Amino acid sequence: MTIEQQERTFAVPHGFELSMASGMQRYAAQHGDWTLTSVFQPVFSLSHMRAVGYEGLLRAHDGLDRPVAPVDVFGAAARLGEVLQVDRLAQALHLENFRLLGAQREWLFLNVHPGTLTEPYHAAALLANLRRLDIPPRRIVLEVLEQSTDDIERLAESVQEFRERGFLIALDDFGAGHSNLERVWQLNPDLVKIDRIMLLHASLRRDMAAILHGLVSLLHEAGKLVLIEGVETEHEAQLALSCEADFVQGFFFARPHPGLADASLAATVIGDVTERYRVQTEARERSTATRLAPYLRAFERAAERLGAGEPLEEVCWNFLALDDAARCFLLDSHGRQAGRNVVLRMDRAQHETRFLPLSDAQGANWLRRPYFRAAISEPGRVHVTKPYLSINEAIPCVTLSVAVQVGERLGVLCGDIDWKDDTL
């Protein structure tokens, strides 16, 4: 029997009761001794400054109205072999309550066990509920739960089938367990949810913050929208802004609730954190400009002297005498280094011995480097790179570069600056 044939066999879910909670109507269902219902955690667009979706989350209470953790509900279901049945029940509850929610255009994020997508019976139940409630698939984001699977090809095929029906696909808990870059390539989701553990690490370590930014950039280049979940503090919200995430979710912005997000409050919270981000960014930019100023003056003077015919070893001394100046070098118009690195201080030369195989850069080709391409494209202007990892010593550096006429040929003068414990 096809999914379409099975879909027609499903009717209104049995055992659902309409109740009042927090002054709002919502459906609840019994599962054994537990009462199950839904709450919704908003998903916010940082650019739109409003909720663009709601994730349906299960809530459970026992016979004495004591809360039961959702992990315990699914843990008990796993022991009884009923995970897919409880998963289907949760989805039906969330859909019923989402309809009561009154959201006009927002998405509903539904956590789904991989079996919901791969087994026709469970897929048909989901489609039947959507049709009965007149909710188009385009309003649903299916979050593929972080689960190991024995047949990833079958799951990928099922994911593609649901996408063709109009659903959006999200990969949940990226960075934890089985959700990694390989799973992104395998399932080709529309949206990737970065797990809180990665955000937590990024909030504690500068290098991890850089990795988070790079990861978001990588996912964007792969054509994926990015949601950072578990944002709980101002600092974490600033990280989400700085790494250019598309969406955020977490207690800092809004807690799970039976009803819609407070649009005015959300706009205020996002607006305030965005304004503080602007102020902090501008302060960092001013600090960076102040820090760079003496290096730029010395470098510009070195370029003038080089263009006037003085040798490279002579013109770079003032630049290299500055505290964090690392080296100067000259490239030809094809990006090939014309001579050795010019290094002034003995401590620098001793430090570079750990990377002795890389110390002789004469003849190296730096054509791929942004500092070369930028200088060649606009001769006479000094260009400044963003911090990047120097191949010379595997530490962050910033490179100044300028294309100058050296005799009858165009060359590119470059100067590296150690850039530890700061960013541009």
Image (spheres, helix red, strand yellow):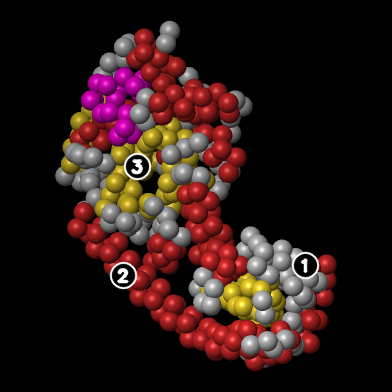
Magenta region, residue range: 125-140
Between the residue at mark 1 and the residue at mark 2, the CA separation in whole angstroms equals 48 Å
Dot 3 crowding, Cα within 10 Å, few <14, some 14–19, many 20+ = many
Q: Nearer the viewer, residue 208 or 62?
A: 208
Secondary structure that dominates the magenta span: helix
Q: Amino acid at mark 1?
A: Gly
Q: Nearer the viewer, mark 3 or mark 1?
A: 1
Q: Position of residue 168 (x, y in %)?
A: 38, 35
Location of mark 3 (residue): 55
Task: Please tell me whether residue 127 belongs to the stretch shown in magenta.
Answer: yes
Q: Position of residue 410 (x, y in %)?
A: 63, 73
Dot 1 crowding, Cα within 10 Å, few <14, some 14–19, many 20+ = some
Dot 2 crowding, Cα within 10 Å, few <14, some 14–19, many 20+ = few
Residue 276 visible to an observer of this rendering: yes
Residue 423 visible to an observer of this rendering: no
Q: Is residue 18 left or right of residue 198?
A: left
Location of mark 1 (residue): 363
Instruction: State yes or no: discs 1 and 2 in contact (Cβ < 8 Å).
Output: no
Q: Is residue 273 left or right of residue 366?
A: left
Helix, strand or loop status at disc 2: helix
Decide: is 227 above or below 94: below
Q: Residue at x 43, y 64 (%)?
A: 242
Lower sequence index among marks 1 and 2: 2
Quarter where residue 69 is shown: top left
Location of mark 2 (residue): 275
Q: Residue at x 35, y 29 (%)?
A: 166
Question: Where's the N terminus, which quadrant?
Answer: top left
